[in-house]
């Protein structure tokens, strides 16, 4: 059977189904060789929000809203057209300082490979090893190298040596040092 002309929305549905392994798959976009690290993602975000009504089907809009953080996950409908409204305004995307800071940080993380599966697996393994205490000796050694070996700590807390704080928490007066 010959291929038939398909509508714009059916092409998008097919494209969305192939995103698990296609050019827009997570493994291709979130790796250190991704073009996302060199693109102006902030401008792309503003462009996507500005074209909300003309660029996306209602199903795509719902799928996008489903992925937003809970406070932005609103499904308000335009009373005149009956279509879903974008829960984020273009002004918000342009002005929000947290979003402005997050975009370059995200690009840096993509560029450094933090979203790649191998890096994620190593990070999970390191967290588990840390939880199990594998690095405790190393951390203790580093702390002692930076702050001393802890010999000045007694059973009841720090030992106050001569010239330390008095019992009322004030620096002692004497040896040429007086209160002003």
Image: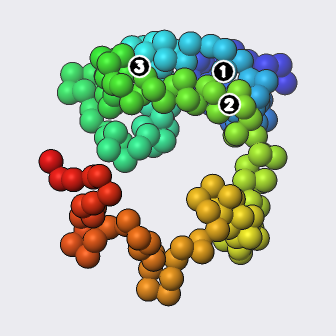
Q: Residues within 10 Å of mark 1 (few under 14, many from 20)?
A: some
Query: Is residue 121 positioned above or below 132 on the image?
Result: above
Q: Which residue is mark 1?
A: 36
Q: Which residue is mark 2?
A: 110
The mark lying in front, picked from 3 and 1, is 1
Label disc, if present, on residue 124 of the rendered structure: none
Q: Quadrant of the N terminus?
A: top right
Residue 89 found in image quarter: top left
Q: Position of residue 78 (x, y in %)?
A: 25, 27
Residue at 33%, 24% in the rendered image: 96
Instruction: Judge left or right: residue 90 versus residue 27.
Output: left
Q: Position of residue 91 (x, y in %)?
A: 30, 17
Count of numbered labels shown in the rendering: 3
Q: Nearer the viewer, residue 103 or 91?
A: 103
The alpha-carbon separation of the residues under discs 3 and 2 comes to 22 Å
Q: Is residue 109 visible?
A: yes
The alpha-carbon separation of the residues under discs 3 and 1 comes to 18 Å
Instruction: Judge left or right: residue 18 versus residue 70.
Output: right
Residue at 54%, 73% in the rendered image: 152
Of the numbered discs 2 and 1, the one sitting upstream in the chain is: 1
Residue 174 found in image quarter: bottom left
Label disc, if present, on residue 49 of the rendered structure: 3
Residue at 51%, 25% in the rendered image: 103
Residue at 27%, 52% in the rendered image: 177
Q: Residues within 10 Å of mark 3 (few under 14, many from 20)?
A: some
Secondary structure of the residue carrying numbered label 3: helix
Whether pointer 3 and pointer 2 mark residues with C-beta atoms closer than 8 Å, the reply is no
Secondary structure of the residue carrying numbered label 2: helix
Whether pointer 2 and pointer 1 mark residues with C-beta atoms closer than 8 Å, the reply is yes
Q: Nearer the viewer, residue 91 or 4?
A: 91
């Amino acid at each position: 059977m010959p291929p038939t002309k398909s509508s714009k929305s059916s092409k998008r549905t097919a494209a969305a189904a192939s995103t698990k392994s296609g050019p827009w798959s997570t493994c291709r976009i979130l790796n250190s060789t991704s073009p996302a690290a060199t693109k102006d993602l902030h401008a792309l975000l503003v462009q996507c929000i500005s074209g909300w009504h003309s660029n996306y089907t209602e199903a795509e809009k719902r799928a996008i809203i489903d992925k937003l953080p809970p406070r932005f996950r609103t499904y308000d409908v335009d009373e005149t057209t009956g279509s879903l409204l974008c829960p984020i305004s273009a002004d918000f995307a342009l002005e929000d300082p947290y979003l402005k800071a997050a975009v370059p940080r995200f690009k840096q993380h993509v560029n450094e490979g933090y979203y790649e599966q191998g890096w994620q697996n190593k990070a999970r393994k390191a967290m588990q090893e840390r939880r199990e205490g594998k690095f405790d000796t190393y951390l203790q050694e580093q702390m002692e190298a930076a702050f001393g070996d802890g010999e000045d700590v007694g059973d009841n807390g720090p030992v106050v040596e001569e010239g330390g704080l008095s019992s009322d928490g004030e620096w002692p007066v004497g040896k040429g040092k007086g209160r002003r």
